[in-house]
Amino acid sequence: MRILTGIQASGRPHLGNILGAIRPAIELSKNPANESFLFIADLHTLTSLKDGRILRENTYAIAAAWLACGFDADKNFFYRQSKLAGYHTELMWYLNCFTPFPMLANGHSFKDKSEKLADVNAGLFTYPVLQAADIMLYDAHIVPVGKDQRQHLEMTRDLGGAFNRQYGEDTLVLPEAKIDEAVMTIPGIDGAKMSKSLNNYIDIFLNEKDLLKVVKKVVTDAKALEDPKDPETDNVFKLYSLVANKEEIEEMRANYLAGGYGYGHAKNALHAVLIREFAEEREKFEYYMNHIPELEQKLQEGEAKAEQIAKVTISRIRKKMNFDD
Ligand code: TYM
């Protein structure tokens, strides 16, 4: 099976990306029957971030996060979308010509911003088509993503289906989304979906002191230390439950219900468990960010390998379309 997923470089990798996409994708990549394509969607990032220097820094941070979380880049495919831009955007153009306007007008990310149309660039509007191209360019079967990407995967299948009806059922492989319902949408420090654009994210690669500062900002109600608290509605408890082990979660739940346990205690516990659970990842991330040439080399090797696959798919598609013999 071919597994494929991407992460934008719009900021540093956060807990939502790691639990929603990076970890599930790496788990799948460990099965020797799978080939994994894990990449940095830096062309997509351009829809929202124009500063090339920051874009490059973020790109390295996402790449370092993939490796820090255990991705074996040598056995798989690891690349920047921008380095294979010719192939990605060529397929995107073909798919654009099969994309009905209302499909994009109904896209969640477009609709969220459609109140101020002057701020919507064409890249943002056609974002899902580039994503469909990213996926079908490598004949991916499975796409592990967070729940927020479900609609993009449905669009990908719709576009692939329309394309195949025209050029033959064996032209494009239609992918399946793999969404871990248990993880669902990881909440940010304010309880809304954790996201770079909302600036409510937890960057688990921060140094301990700065990480504590972020954890201290998790929004809670104003109950006093001695009051019993509702674990089900509290953001600190929700985040803790995603990272701590079963006994620890039950212990915190009991503390909440009993009272005499403050949000400050819970935040310290969350901070400690983040440091413990991500100890190895934090160390490796630091290493790669201090050894950029090594990171760069892994990416370049990955890009050369990915190009071989992209070439084959594009030439198959072009033949089906009668552009080439
Ligand atoms: P991006 O960078 O917004 O998100 C990357 C991945 O992280 C997941 N994610 C979350 N999961 C759970 N809870 C959260 N709070 C949370 N925030 C982010 C996202 O679901 C996603 O899986 N469009 C993609 C990038 C992309 C892509 C692709 C993905 C471009 N081409 C091809 C798969 C296949 C995105 O939104 O990235």
Image (cartoon, rainbow, N blue to C red):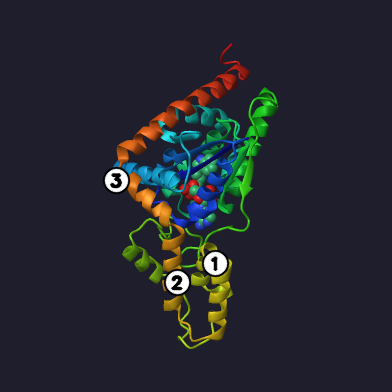
Rendered location of residue 51, percent (x, y): 31, 44
Whether label 1 touches label 3, CB < 8 Å: no
Q: How far apart are marks 1 and 3 (CA)?
A: 32 Å
Tell me: is circle 1 under 8 Å from ligand 1: no
Residue 158 lies left or right of residue 47; in this view the side is right
Q: In this view, does 186 lie above or below 247?
A: above
Rendered location of residue 34, percent (x, y): 60, 36
Quarter occupied by the C terminus? top right
Q: Distance between the residues labelled 1 and 2?
A: 11 Å
Q: How far apart are marks 3 and 2 (CA)?
A: 29 Å
The residue tagged with tag 1: helix, strand or loop?
A: helix
The residue tagged with tag 3: helix, strand or loop?
A: loop
What is the number of the mark on residue 241?
A: 1
Say if residue 112 shows up in the picture.
no
On the image, which quarter does residue 1 sit in?
Answer: top right
Question: Residue at (58%, 32%) from the top-left corner?
Answer: 136
Question: Residue at (45%, 40%) from the top-left corner?
Answer: 41
Say if residue 247 shows up in the picture.
yes
Mark 3, Cα crowd under 10 Å, few <14 / some 14-19 / many 20+, is few
Q: Is residue 60 above or below residue 236?
A: above
The residue tagged with tag 2: helix, strand or loop?
A: helix
* Residue type marked 1: Ser
Mark 1, Cα crowd under 10 Å, few <14 / some 14-19 / many 20+, is some
Rendered location of residue 323, percent (x, y): 56, 16
What is the number of the mark on residue 269?
A: 2
Q: In this view, does 267 lie above or below 167?
A: below
